[in-house]
Image (spheres, rainbow, N blue to C red):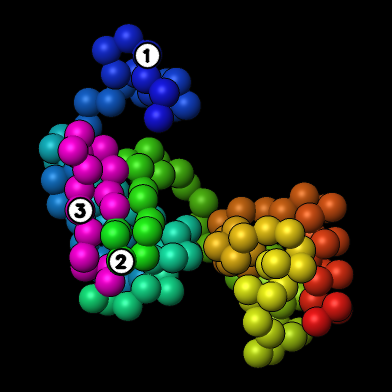
Amino acid sequence: MILLNRGTNILTNRTMTEHIIKVWFAAGRIYIKTDKDNVLSRPLEAFPLLMDASEAQRLRFEIGLYADDIHWPDIDEDISIDSFYETEEPDYGNDTALVIKQHPGIDLNSVASRAGIHKTLLQKYIYGIKKPSAERFGKIVNALTEG
């Protein structure tokens, strides 16, 4: 994270005055409570490593030294408080999801590798949290037909 004068994050232009005090999971989401009494949540689809993790792995986390991030050592995942201000929700009707559904049982690691991307990014495309460019979508389709 790049900080400017007295804790302004240049990525969000938001003063870093809010701190995480509580983390929990419910109904397919991760929730945090801040010291400003705000409750924020994100769908687990936004964090594929957490989504794939066991409940025990999800519950083994550490709130960072400055209380602006969470770390899961078992799965090597780090999430910043800024991630909770993003608004994308899952969209399972997106083009990538529809193409993947045509190949049941496909190994996502192999598809991602052939497409030249990380599996978690492919999962975000499938969940509709992120949208691939036309070129990237073409690489995913080609990777599916190669396998």
For the N terminus, the quadrant is top left
Identified at 60% across, 66% down, the residue is: 119
Whether residue 110 is visible to the viewer of this picture, yes or no, is yes
> As drawn, which residue projects farthest toward the bottom?
105
| Residue 34 coordinates in the image, percent (x, y) | 18, 41
Give the residue type that dot 3 points to: Glu
Q: Work out how far the residue at label 1 is from the one at label 2, CA to CA, in angstroms.
A: 32 Å
Q: Which residue is mark 1?
A: 4
Residue under the point 23% across and 51% down: 32
Q: Amino acid at mark 2?
A: Asp
Which residue lies under the disc numbered 2? Answer: 74
Q: Quadrant of residue 92?
A: bottom right
Along the polypeptide, which appears first: circle 3 or circle 1? 1
Q: Secondary structure at mark 3?
A: strand
**Circle 3 is placed at which residue position?**
62
What label does residue 85 carry, if any? none
Frontmost residue, 146 versus 55: 146
